[in-house]
Amino acid sequence: MTGAHRITVQSMLDELAPGERRELKRTIEPTGSEGRFWDIAMDGRVAEGSLEWINKQYPSQDSREDPFVRMSDIEQPRLVAREDVSPIGDVYRLLNRIFFLAAPLVDCIRSLDPNAVEVRECISQGNRHAFYLVLITRRLDAIDVARTDLVLHNKRVLPDRDVYGKRVYYPRGLVLRDDVPTDVHCFSDVHSASIFFSTDLVACARAKRLVLFSARHPTGLGSFPESQSGQCAWPLGSGSRCARPE
């Protein structure tokens, strides 16, 4: 099947009538070893407590937003760390594609896939290293529909008006297609809040001994293999700390 005729999530969404809901079962069972990408998890609760954004202003995530706010338009973010609330992690999701990421992780992204993100360095107080405000700009419709259970819904979003919004749910995890270009290491799924890092990018992040960072297989069938060198990779929300090398 050529790319021009490939069935994608978007092509199926385009066929939905207003109010229509479809449940599609996968025809090929995943094994948990598919692909080279990992779903990046983080403890969102920590972001609300331990890392305070003093002059909060978000860049736009959608080109249709009015007014459209560029990353360069916002005031340089000022952060205050509060370890009395919870341990300071290295990955904080703010909105679907907007994060605070620790400088070592941003270095990994810049070295492998600089075109995947827009970044703005923050002014940090009380943090052990610098943070960046990061917008994941690359968005792909890369779901393998044959290996993924899907629920598609063209849902009425206003009860008293004929206004609908199309939604996609992955009730049992997902599998990504194997045709994502090899020079892509970071992207977000067009239809969900999932962010994916390549095996190489996760390995780079693990080498930095990040805190409150977790990489799970998109199918939900496993986590990124533990390093043999004793590097720590704490599960989501564990609150554990690693000793960062000097």
Image: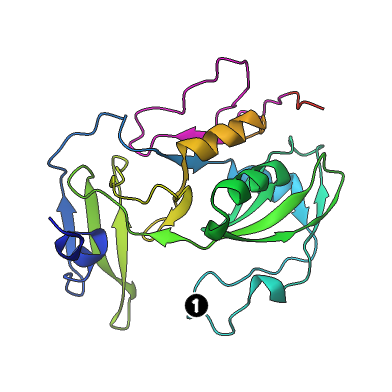
Q: Position of residue 58 (x, y in %)?
A: 65, 68
Tell me what residue is drawn at x 14 percent, y 63 percent: 5
Residue 14 placement, left or right of 179: left
Would you say the magenta stretch is mainly helix, strand or loop?
loop
Q: Residues within 10 Å of mark 1 (few under 14, many from 20)?
A: few
Residue 118 placement, left or right of 85: left
Tell me what residue is drawn at x 50 percent, y 42 percent: 40
Q: Identify the image quadrant of the N terminus.
A: bottom left
Tell me what residue is drawn at x 65 percent, y 48 percent: 106
Q: Which residue is mark 1?
A: 63
Q: Which residues are magenta?
A: 214-242
Task: Give, as a three-letter code, the residue at label 1.
Answer: Ser
> With respect to residue 74, does 113 lie above or below?
above
Q: Quadrant of residue 68?
A: bottom right
Residue 34 placement, left or right of 94: left
Q: Position of residue 92 (x, y in %)?
A: 63, 48
Secondary element under disc 1, as helix, strand or loop, is loop
